[in-house]
Each structure stands twice: as structure tokens, then as C-alpha cells.
Image (tube, helix red, strand yellow):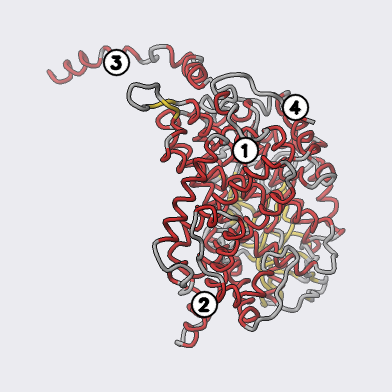
Amino acid sequence: MSHLVEDFKPGPLDVYRKKTSFDCKKLKLFLETEDGIKFQNEIYKILENNPLYNQQNVAGLSRDNQRRIAFLGSRDQSQQYAFSFDYLMQNLRRASALVRILTTAIPSSYAKYLVANRFFVNSILSMGTERHQKIIDDAKTGKILGCYCLTEIAHGSNTKSMRTTATYDKHKKVFIINSPDFESGKCWAGGLGQTAMYGTVFAQLILDGVNYGLHAFLVPLRDPKTLIPYPGLEIWDMGRKIGLNGVDNGVVQFTNYEIPRINLLNKIADVSEDGRYITPIKDPNRRHGAALGSLSAGRVTVATIVDALAAKAITIAVRYAAVRKQFGPSGKEEIPILEYQSHQLRLIPYLAATYVIRNFNTYFTQMLYEFTKNPSLPNALEVGIEIHGVSSASKPIAGWILRDAVQECRECCGGHGYLQAAGLGDVRDNLDPNLTVEGENHVLIQQTVNWLLKLAPQMLARRQISSPMHSIDFLSNGLSILSNNRFDAREVEEISHPESIIKTFQWIVVYLLKATYEKVEGELKAGKDLFEAKNNSQVYYGKSLGLAFIQHFFLKIFLVTISEAEDPAIKAVLTRIFSLFGLWSIEKWHMATLFKGGFASNELAPTLIQDAILKLCADLKDDAVGLVDAIAVPDFILRSCLGSSDGQVYKRLKESMTKNEYNMNRPPWWKEVVNYAENNRSKSKL
């Protein structure tokens, strides 16, 4: 099966490739599976042979050209069977693979495709009924382009306070949509700026003067034949952004805009012709949660987008570090910067983080699609709750860790990393919006904390706690973990053992859950209302709890993957990755908690943890090139003069500078330069 993975061309990177302790092809086959690699190769072939997808420096084109390319690419994707939902369902690993490839290859056109063919369609599938099937069919065939309109100018995370209204008129049997002012305009919807013909619009449902809360409506936006907005709508583009300028993010405001009654997405609730509100969910809070339930899928996708971009950055930085030489022992040759301990500590923990988070996102995407395929499972409610709780932490933490990874990669490549041809600037700009899309991260993680806080009384009462993905099962033994687990390692090897790391993380989660719960309860007893009590319990409590919880779950899933590895060399390198990510995470975020809660009591704990981190970085140094090779995209997608798979950094660097005719000539305004002094002297005499 190794024939499925192409050999790399010989070059400077061979020095490290020959040192690798494992077979890179076997590792790739283990991580991606045979079907997964065949699927990836199929997608690569489609992209490489289509000029829409194989363009250099798209970000340097005019905004209009970026928009046109993104539109054409998104429409082509919608027609590719290999990208279709049915094809992905044949092997659930394909879904995350497709996200990673298209994110790194064609970010703007893939973003447009995601909005129109995933988020828009999925919102109708999850909240609509058979009466909306024609819209789904038209969207899938490309007859219409849709968008997803939730966020407002003045409200994003606080969805309950959104101010767009949909008032039912019994006589006309229509909903009348209004935006009270500019601040209530729907914004940031991808495709809304110039091309969307329909939108899933969230608005407060008003019946006879009573507000029934946020509901979703199918709203026609533009004439499909002319792209002119309908009367009663004011739509405009939001303008240039830091990146992804191929996506036309827009704003829409409504003025007495009428839509048919049946355009209410009515799986959760409906309105009869005579204006009666009908719903099987009587609790308005549960109804609100159900209306926004489709956002979990978006968060899982965003986390996968982020790990793909981080893999691209870490590939570039590690390959560059293996070739770039600076200094060395006196009288001897210069050595690669990858040999320096400080450089290893800057890069290799982020390489480990990329592996751990990538592995988790592959697992989590499979779980999400399983749930999508079987929404009527007996434990569907429990699965949905856990997916929401986990995704509300995995999306923020993956984003924060891998954002820092990309920035570190940029800096590790020095001045050359600042060149657009290095590819790191585009990666950084394309990752950036994922830190705020699909929910503000600090608000999202509070939802995970709220879910965990509901479990605290059960844990303190020593009751059984379990969930479908088993992310919280260990809380059943929370009090035993808190009283029995202590730092008892005396050697680096002991503290690096996976069992020791898991025990430490479980203690951190239990300690922080108990501390956060007691903090909230204490605030309530002091006379604070619930809002203020929770607000005063986030910093050093709730946020740290959410972080530790998801890091533990990341590691737990990675440990499952390690257990499945039959090749001893692969098992060994993945175990080192596990240990490095675990210990680095503890040292970076949780050391104070270990001392505060009494898990550790002297300097031996931080000393051993730091020594272990440095040893693991050194142990993984010779494997770093092989590890990025196993997750790297092909060069035509990587698009980096510093990270090319042949390692010819300086050859590619020169080509990137000299192939542009503008770089090789004097500027068209050269006469202004040579005549400036003379012209300036003449002006001064006047």
C-alpha cells in the first residue's frame, strides 16, 4: 500500500529523513487509512488539473477577481461528486480530509462553498420540514445561492437579544420582517454582500404582540435572474477584510419585508394560518437551544480548518529549520537551526499540538456525522448535549493554541518568513477569522463550563456520571481522584508516562470543577444574582476548567489512537507526541493550579516537567521532518518557497524573487526619483 504515497525528491531534507525513527509512509497510512489516502489523492488530482484551484498568489489579485474565482470555484465544488455529502458518507474520515485539503488549497472558494452548500442547506435540513425541500434541491443543484444570517451589527453571542423581528399578519398570512435600526442589521453572512439569493434569517417571532423568541426563516434576498435585491431590502458589502477577500460578507436591513407563512422553518415550532403558535417544546430555553443546535457542526468544521492551516505552517517552519544553518561549534561547520534547544522548544510542542488536535478533530467529525446519519438514536439527546459541550471548548482551544503555533512558525522563519512567497502570511490571515466565527471563543467556553457545573453536584455526591463519548465518565470518581492523586514522580521517565499525565489532568479537571462550583455558590450566598456570580467565576476558574477539560479529552482520544498502532516505531513516536503535548500544556497553563490545590508541593514537580519537555523535544527533533511529511499537503497546495518538499530553500527563494518582472526592473516612475533633487531645488528657490 506504500505506493499510494509518493516518494519525495532527493535534496537537503534527506539528512533528517534518514534519521527518522519510523517509516513515514506507514505512519501516514496508519493515520489516514488506505481509503483516506486514495480519497486525498483523488481530490489532489481534481485540484491540480483545474486552473480554478491551482493559482498562485490569489490574495494579490483585485478584490473583484478574488470574488469571481471564489464564486466559480465554489460552484465547481458543488458539482463535484467527490465533494458531495453522499460520497463523504461512504467513509466518515473523508469529511475531515476534505475540509483540510480545500481549506489549505482554496480558502475563499471553499468558504463560499461551505456557506452555500453546507451551512445554508444544513440549517434547512435541521430546522425545516418537507415543505422546504425545493429550496434544498435548488441549492444543491446550484440554481440558488444561500447564506446564513444570524449575527447582527450590535449582537453576536447574545442571540436572545437580537432585534430583527418577524411579525405575523393573520390577514395577509405573511411574516413582516423589520430591522429597527442599523444596529439590528444582519451582518457578516458569507455570500450576502453580492451573490446570495436566499438566506436563513434568525428573527424574533412576534404573534399578537407577544415575542416567542428567536426563530429561523427562509428569506428571498435577490432576484435569481438579475441579483438585484428585492424591494424592502437594503443590502451592501462590508468591504475589504484582513483576509478571505474572495468571500462577499454583507449586511442586510429589512423594512416591512413580507415573506410567506410557510417560510418559517418549522421543525421546532410552527404558526398556523390563524396565528396560533404550535410547538412540541414548551420550555423557551430548550426551544432556543434547539434553534441554534446546528451551530455545533460549524464549530467542529472550524476546529478542523484551524488544524489544517496549522499543519501547513508547521510543515513550512520545520522544513526550513532543517535546512537553514546558522553558527556552530568553534572551527566546525554551521548547524541547522533545528539543532538548537531554543528552536526545538519554539516549534516541536506546536508540532505535537497539531498532531493531537488533528487526531481529535478527525474523531469528533466522525462522531458528528454518525449523529447526523442517525438523529433518532435512543440517546440522541445525550449525544447532542455532549457534542455541544465538547465543541464549545474544542473550537476555542484549538483556535488559540494553533493561532500561536502559526505566529511562532512565522517568527521561526525570520525575515524570509515575512515574504508572501513563504506562504505564512496567508495562513495567518486565513486562520484569523476562525477565532471569532461560529461564536466568540470566551463566550463559547462558558457554555462548556455551564455544562460541567451541572455535573458538579453529582460528582460531589459520588453519583455515576457518563456520556456517549465518555468525555466526563472519570468525574464519577472525582472525589477519589482529588484525594488520592498526588505528584509522586521522581524521574523524567515517570512523569512522561501517559498514565501519569492522564492522572494529573484528571486531578486538574476535578479540582477546577469543584473550585469553580464552590466559587459560584459562594458568590450566590454573598447576595449576587446568578449572572453576576458566574461572571465573577470565569477568570482563574471557569476558563481554566474548560481548557483543562478539553485538553484531557484531546489526550484521551490520542491515547486510543496510540493503542491501535501495531508498528512499535509508530507507537513510540506517537507516545512521545502525547507526552510532550500533555506536559507542555501542564507547564504552560496549569502549573499554578497544581500548587494551589496541593497536588505538588516543592520545586521537583516543575523541574521534572521542564526537564521532560526539553528531553522530549530533543527526542523528537530527528523525527520532526518525517512527522510533517506525514501530514503535509503537496507542494502545489503548500505554495511556499521555504517549505517545499525538496528542501531547496534558497533555489525556491531566488525563483520567487526573480520570476516577477516588476522585481527585476526600475519602477515606471523612475524619472521622479532621479529628478526629485533638481525639482525640489527649483521649488525652494521660488
Do the CB atoms of the residues marked 1 and 2 lie less than 8 Å apart?
Answer: no
| Res. 539 visible in picture | no
Does 590 sit above or below residue 4? below
Mark 3 vs mark 4, CA separation in Å: 48 Å
- The residue carrying pointer 4 sits among few (fewer than 14), some (14 to 19) or many (20 or more) residues within 10 Å by Cα, namely few
Q: Nearer the viewer, mark 1 or mark 4?
A: 4
Between the residue at mark 1 and the residue at mark 2, the CA separation in whole angstroms equals 39 Å
Image coordinates of residue 204 in percent, x first then y, are: 65, 68
Q: Hey, what amino acid is under mark 4?
A: Lys
- Residue 531: which disc? 2
Q: Please, what secondary structure does the residue beneath circle 2 have?
A: helix
Q: Amino acid at mark 2?
A: Phe
Quadrant location of the C terminus in the rendered image: top left
Image point (65%, 65%), residue name: 389
Q: Nearer the viewer, residue 440 or 511?
A: 511
Disc 4 designates what residue? Answer: 45
